[in-house]
Image (cartoon, helix red, strand yellow):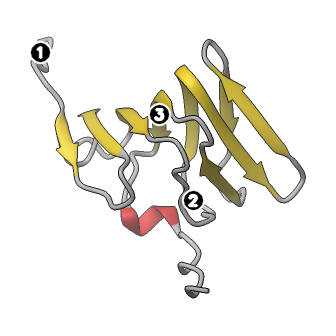
Amino acid sequence: MPEFIAEPTRVPVPGGKTIDEYVGRVRTNDEAVSIADMHAPAGWSEPAQTPDFDEFTLVLSGELQVVSDAETLHVRAGQAVITRQGERVRYHTTEGARYIAVCMPAFSLDLVHRDPDPLPE
């Protein structure tokens, strides 16, 4: 039987970014996949991570920068990027972005393996 999801669950995170999860560990107790609507303000960034999941990201507006050890990708509205499990990446914005993130298996703090925050200057 289909399961209707009337609204997402807001997942609290620091730094001004919002995560509205429609499917995943928080909203539907699903461990196989997570689907979230993300809003990252201009100048937002997070520490590098080496996750134990694949992440499929579709940018709806703005630009998301994805930094790997090999290159920096500028992913703009209407474009997508795939990052693979075990690949070290860092996400940030200059102008801000809205994007859909799909993680398989579902995102969790135990699987993301973020680098420690850098020391303040």
Residue at the spot of label 3: 101
Mark 3: amino acid: Ala
Mark 1: amino acid: Phe
> In terms of secondary structure, where does tag 2 sit?
loop
- Is tag 3's residue or tag 1's residue first in the polypeptide sequence? 1
On the question of residue 23 being in view, the answer is no
Task: Give the alpha-carbon distance from disc 2 to disc 1, as whole Å.
Answer: 29 Å
Q: Nearer the viewer, mark 3 or mark 1?
A: 3
Residue at the spot of label 1: 4
Q: Give x and y (percent) for residue 109.
A: 38, 64
Which disc number belongs to residue 51? 2
- Is 98 left or right of 63, judged from the image as shown? left
Instruction: Bin the neighbour count of mark 3 within 10 Å (Cα to Cα): few under 14, some 14-19, many 20 and up.
Output: many
> In terms of secondary structure, where does tag 1 sit?
loop
Nearer to me, 85 or 99: 99
Quadrant placement of the C terminus: bottom right
Counting every numbered tag in the picture gives 3
On the question of residue 12 being in view, the answer is yes
Q: Which residue does the image show at 35% across and 51% down from the upper left?
A: 16
Q: Reply above or below: 62 against 87.
A: above
Instruction: Bin the neighbour count of mark 2 within 10 Å (Cα to Cα): few under 14, some 14-19, many 20 and up.
Output: many
Q: Which residue does the image show at 11% across and 15% down from the upper left?
A: 4
Instruction: Bin the neighbour count of mark 1 within 10 Å (Cα to Cα): few under 14, some 14-19, many 20 and up.
Output: few
Task: Give the alpha-carbon distance from disc 2 to disc 3, as whole Å.
Answer: 14 Å
Which disc number belongs to residue 43? none
Q: Which residue does the image show at 46% across and 33% down from the upper left?
A: 102
- Is tag 2's residue or tag 1's residue first in the polypeptide sequence? 1
Q: Reply above or below: 22 against 91.
A: above
Mark 2: amino acid: Pro
